Amino acid sequence: MNAPIKPGYVRPLDLKHGRIDMTHGGGGRAMKQLIEQLFASAFDNEWLAQGNDMARVVLPPGRVVMATDSHVITPLFFPGGDIGCLSVHGTVNDVAMAGAVPVYLAAGFILEEGFPLASLKRIVDSMARAAREANVAIVTGDTKVVEQGKGDGVFITTTGIGVVEDGFVIGGERARAGDAILLSGFIGDHGMTIMSTRESLAFGADLQSDTAALHGLVAAMLDPVREAMRGDASRGIHVLRDPTRGGLATTLNEIAGQSGVGMLIEESAIPVRPQVEAACEFLGLDPLYVANEGKLVAFVAAEDADRVLVAMRGHPLGRDAARIGTVTEAPHHFVQMATRFGGRRVVDWLTGEQLPRIC
Amino acid sequence: MCLAVPVRVVELGAGDAAIVDLGGIRKEVSLALVEDVAVGDYVILHVGYALTKLDPVEAERTLALFAEAGVLPQ
Amino acid sequence: MKYIDEFRDGELARGIAAQIAREIRPDRRYQFMEFCGGHTHAISRYGITDLLPPQIKLIHGPGCPVCVLPIGRVDLAIRLALEHKVWLATYGDCLRVPASDGLSLLKAKARGAKVAMVYSAADALDLARRQPEAQVVFFAIGFETTTPPTALVIRKAAAEGITNFSVVCNHVLTPSAITSILESPEVRQLGTVPLDGFIGPAHVSTVIGSRPYEHFAQEYAKPVVIAGFEPLDVMQAILMLVRQVNDGRAEVENEFTRAVTRDGNLKAQALVSEVFELRRSFEWRGLGEVPYSALQIRGEYAAFDAEKKFALETRKVLDNKACECGAILRGVKHPRDCRIFGTVCTPENPIGSCMVSSEGACAAHYTYGRFREIAVQAA
């Protein structure tokens, strides 16, 4: 006679050699197992443990800020990070750019049939680590599976909520003539790291993505001006934005348009690593348009600029922070740059995608 | 047209292959269009091929010309 | 970066600028054509115009292989990808060029065409090696700088007996382009485009040498100064041109001595002659048919000639009626003279070739020059 079957026994996921198949998105046992053994165990919090399709949360006091980001990056793993931590950082940063403290995240996964479970585990563990370090909880999520060929391995969408002090209005429409433009560090690291992994453009370098959660830096920047901002809306930090796709140039143009101002920046003040400069030279790219994932630009009232800059430099993610320019009164909203060479040029919107060129 | 960069040859490989360096970035390129290239030489690189060697003496001479332009008597 | 940073020094720039200002004759105008798109780019990117006295005017010439590529040739590439279902390997520059039926190579890719962007001709050949069951076609563009690499891969493919690789050859020749400018009615007869000299291309010259330009200096009495790519090179070349004009000289001078010799790269030239021969005529977008201005693959290498292999015919496609690219490429008109510049025709939605490539006169003006005009109006 055979040994009695243990009630409720389910063979554990083969995280070494297993692959995603259509049953994992089917809503049945296989999906439940995937969620429990992979996602919930990694993200590990009381909300996910409840096993609902939603999470009841309590928010600290303040104005609620919400943001969402989808991540479709290839390759999934790159020097300095992966799609997992990127998806946490991206949304945490969007929330932080309101001057808010991010608290909860939701994560949706679209998995491609055939995707190795080992890779998924690596990504999920990375997300869990990033969330822990950022002090946010991933409280709810969703999983779907698409047929092979209809996805790039995995797509992740994260939505985040946080709170900002009531009365603080930090946004792209608030830049004013005279504001100082501060940049938190080296530009172009992430984009050129990704480029360096692409087949046709492979070159050896020790470039690393700069992907990072910036809310700690933002909090450090707000500290010295919090009081002033409470008393007077024209003081302190007016705008915060992280220059992701399209780079610094695109971000500055967006803000110029939103606020109806012009800008004058100094090329020599913008920090670019020599390797990023060299990589851009090779491909005919302009670092101003290359993506970043762990940098921010801040528009600060002139009288508070020095104070905020000092606070930035005192934080690990802002050590190389610099003042790169000033907001000007300009009807045409151009972002102008004084070149290292001595002449001036306009830094315009990015057209399409920046592609390596031979010409 | 013709985006090309001056790069330093750091390693010679099999056949016409070589590794060059620009500002710390290394890349594998082809020396098939040039001759007598040694490690340490600078070449002008275009679409993965070295087009010519860069003459360091002429480079210095050109820079000197630039500087001279600024101090010519009037 | 050595040999780059020193040639971008702002201090030296001011010195040369001051010297130019001292040497120009204030009552004279100096109009120089910078032929090469790379120079157009450098002038815009570094704001060189700001450092020059108003008497000097720089005209953008047709030295942009993307800009002079006829729509019909891009259509050919798109047809290869969509109808013949080949792997179409192309440099990044060509991906967004608008062709017929609202298509571009990028848009064709969105429709399922196998379009691969390559950084180098060698990558295209590599693609053929890695996909032996597929046909790979390399869409080769460029002036003399980019031609030798194409010659190399064709020769390599032949040596290795590769049968699934071929090339659409759109390589064009610089001296022919310069001739067509100088022969244009506006320059030759009407004198409506006074050209006082040329800033000669940097990297083309490393391959062809300075000798081919001697013809222009002699025949057309126009000075040519071959300039390196960096902004200081361009400024020094302008100074040298100003001197020639003042002295009444018409010579070929070489500013880019660190990379250009009179003979050029003989090894590369021999290689090109081995694989390519002159086309009797080739259409240049904006310039019309220009005799002996482009290359085709020699009979011995016919197996690698995609135009023969796939029995392709280039259909002539007319430019948009409002498009002034032709006149702009010849230096006859300025982007702002074009009715649709900046409104219908923008870098996001380019109607003509001058707007497509970031080095085209219109794209450069839109991206960098626009604001100067506006500032002037406000003053």
Image: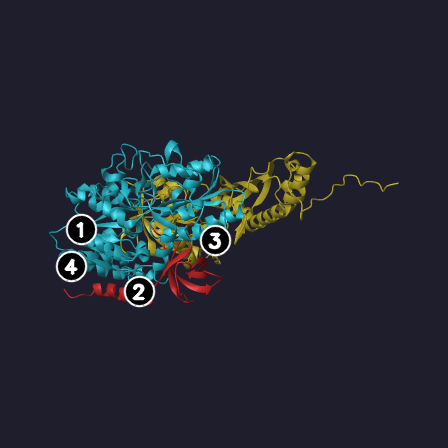
What coloring was used for the rendering? by chain
Q: Are marks 1 and 3 on the same chain?
A: yes
Disc marking residue C22:
4
**Label located before the other in sequence (4 or 3):** 4
Disc 3 and disc 2 in contact, CB within 8 angstroms: no
Specify whether C372 is left or right of C96: left
Residue receiving disc 3: C159
Question: What's the CA distance linking mark 1 and mark 3?
Answer: 44 Å
Q: Chain of mark 2?
A: B
Disc 4 and disc 3 in contact, CB within 8 angstroms: no
How far across and down, in percent of the image, does residue A149 sit? 57, 38
Q: Nearer the viewer, mark 4 or mark 3?
A: 3
Q: Chain of mark 3?
A: C
Residue type for callout 1: Tyr
Q: Nearer the viewer, mark 2 or mark 4?
A: 2
Residue type for callout 4: Arg
Q: Nearer the viewer, mark 4 or mark 1?
A: 1
Q: Nearer the viewer, residue A102 or C100?
A: C100
Residue receiving disc 2: B59
Q: Chain of mark 4?
A: C
Residue type for callout 3: Ala
Q: Nearer the viewer, mark 1 or mark 3?
A: 3
Provide the secondary structure element on which disc 1 rests.
helix
